Amino acid sequence: MSIPTRAAVVESGGAPFTLAEVQLDDPAPHEAVVRMVATGLCHTDLGVASGGLPFPLPGVLGHEGAGVVEAVGSAVTSVAPGDHVVLSFTSCGACGNCDGGHPAYCATWLPLNLLGGRRADGSSTISRDGEPLGGHFFGQSSFAERALVDERSLVKVDPEIPLESIAPLGCGVQTGVGAVWNVLKPGTGATVVVLGAGAVGLSAVMAAALTPATTIVAVDRVSERLSLARELGATHTVHAGEEDLGEALGRITGGRGADGIVETTGNVGVLRGGVDALAARGTLVVVGAPPFGTEVALDVNGLLGGKRIVGLTLGDAETQSFIPALVRLVKEGRLPLHRLISTYPFADIDQAVRDMGAGKAIKPVLTF
């Protein structure tokens, strides 16, 4: 017996989001039905909606959900009806990377989260008028009033925290924080540079401010975002439209270069400039994703000083421990995520998309 709900459907690449009545499949043994309270809007959603990734459309996107469990499948043990949950990515739970605490590098990550649009067994989770839609996006498809969610996408959280204040933890925030905490791991007195002051970049700035790093540099072309970065913990800012990145970082670091850099823009020119600005044995974390097949030229001899370039998915986070820790930091005011969030009623999803594209909103959160 299907479950009716209302969802934002993308009919084809480049089409707007349109609200429509859809039906959810009954929960499989390891799934739950979640009543959505809030869901963040991410650039990955916009990239898929534009047709930039081969996700099956028409379909339902959304992958930064937060809500309340309404029903659970017969094998679900981690949550129960009434629990407050943040939704993140899904994974198989059985491959070497999942077993090793790195589910973001699950052997089946791409089909399960980003490209497949269906469960691992090929069955559909969402339909409209009897016709299957692309769904199961990050194991959740949370641009809907109710979502059918993989158990491995569910993270039980403190019910005292307003869900609209923590919905972005499932993707963008954990990505930025994880880039700093799980990859760079700054030592005492380290210099951390964040290229791009969007939601992911500013999350990285906040994370760096909670480490022993003493120099935290935010780089962007928008003055207002650089001012916000200062308020969130950056010790220095660089306006990329007014200063040369290499010269500015050379001045700030006394010519030594940066110990760690987080690249969030997806611009290969910015990435190359970041690699050149690394100190010996420095690490650059690639977070921003340009179109598939994009390449970047590097000075090979420039890498021989021990520089490392590391690609990153979702902060390389083990969500069941990582997200509750972030929730606690939000609750205690040590991760001021509210400074990034602008809320919109679910029906205004297209306005949220426009504001995000125009740079008016750093992290739009849809509320139900």
Image (spheres, rainbow, N blue to C red):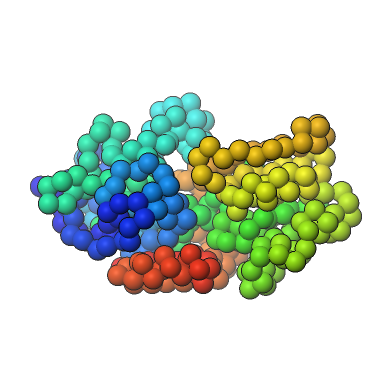
Q: Nearer the viewer, residue 349 or 58?
A: 58
Q: Quick check: 335 above or below 109?
A: below
Query: Please, which residue is most extreme toward the top here?
Result: 96
Query: Please, which residue is most extreme toward the right here?
Result: 254
Query: Please, which residue is most extreme toward the left here?
Result: 1
**What is the quadrant of residue 85 in the picture?**
bottom left
Residue name at image x 63 percent, y 58 percent: 196
Q: Does the rendering let one see residue 130?
A: yes
Residue name at image x 50 percent, y 40 percent: 292
**What is the quadrant of residue 64 in the picture?**
bottom left
x, y (%) of residue 200? 56, 56
Q: Quick check: 64 above or below 117?
A: below
Residue name at image x 67 percent, y 49 percent: 269
Q: Quadrant of the C terminus?
A: bottom left
Counting labels gives: 0
Whether residue 120 sits left or right of residue 304 in the image: it is left
Q: Quick check: 293 above or below 359?
A: above
x, y (%) of residue 97? 50, 30
Q: Quick check: 93 above or below 127?
A: above
Q: Nearer the viewer, residue 59 or 71?
A: 59
x, y (%) of residue 241? 71, 64
x, y (%) of residue 147? 27, 53
Residue name at image x 16 percent, y 52 percent: 128
Q: Does the rendering let one see residue 68?
A: no
Q: Nearer the viewer, residue 358 or 195?
A: 358
